[in-house]
Amino acid sequence: MKENVVKAKSFAFALRVVRLAKYLQDEKKEFVLSKQVLRSGTAIGALVREAEHAESKPDFTHKMNIALKEANETLYWLELLHQAEYIAEQSFTSIRTDSEELVKLLV
């Protein structure tokens, strides 16, 4: 069976976001923005999984479009966290690259 690249990458990204949120809360004591990025960053993979078992083609398209919106929102929160100096340049560059790759896969 062929691996679903979007499914695998969105899950790996969600795991990375969970670890980032934990770091932000434990080390930086940042609780508001970390929850926002956690919510949107983990929603991408959940929506991709939902789309996998969509009831119809329009339902599939709708769920994937929402996943795309969540990916774009996550990118916003990551940029904000970086500009607010909660995320170091190297870490930000790496996770931003992953986020942008997901956006490209979902378009």
Image: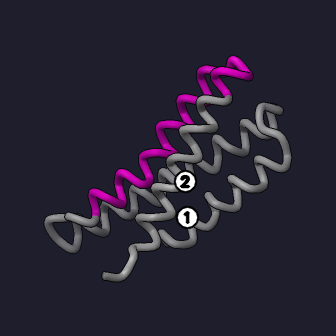
Q: How is the image coloured?
A: one colour
Residue at (36%, 60%) from the top-left corner?
A: 48
Amino acid type assigned to the residue bearing label 1 in the image: Leu
Q: Nearer the viewer, residue 46 or 16?
A: 16
53 vs 70: above or below: below
Residue at (39%, 76%) from the top-left corner?
A: 3
The residue where tag 2 is placed is 13
SS class, disc 2: helix
Q: Which residues are magenta?
A: 24-51
81 vs 55: above or below: above
Magenta span has 105?
no
Residue at (35%, 54%) from the top-left corner?
A: 47
Label 2: few (<14), some (14–19) or many (≥20) C-alpha neighbours in 10 Å: many
Q: Nearer the viewer, residue 21 or 64?
A: 21
63 vs 34: above or below: below
Q: Nearer the viewer, residue 59 or 41?
A: 41
SS class, disc 1: helix
Amino acid type assigned to the residue bearing label 2 in the image: Phe
Where is residue 14? Give x, y as percent.
50, 48
Q: How many numbered tags mark residues here?
A: 2
The residue where tag 1 is placed is 102
Q: Nearer the viewer, residue 2 or 66?
A: 2
Q: Are marks 1 and 2 in contact (CB under 8 Å)?
A: yes
From the image, give the main secondary structure of the stretch colored magenta: helix
Residue at (41%, 54%) from the top-left corner?
A: 45
Magenta span has 34?
yes
Furthest toward the left, the residue is: 55
**Which image quadrant for residue 22?**
top right
Residue 43 tag number: none
Label 1: few (<14), some (14–19) or many (≥20) C-alpha neighbours in 10 Å: many
Q: In the rendered structure, which disc, 1 or 2, sits on the residue that comes first in sequence?
A: 2
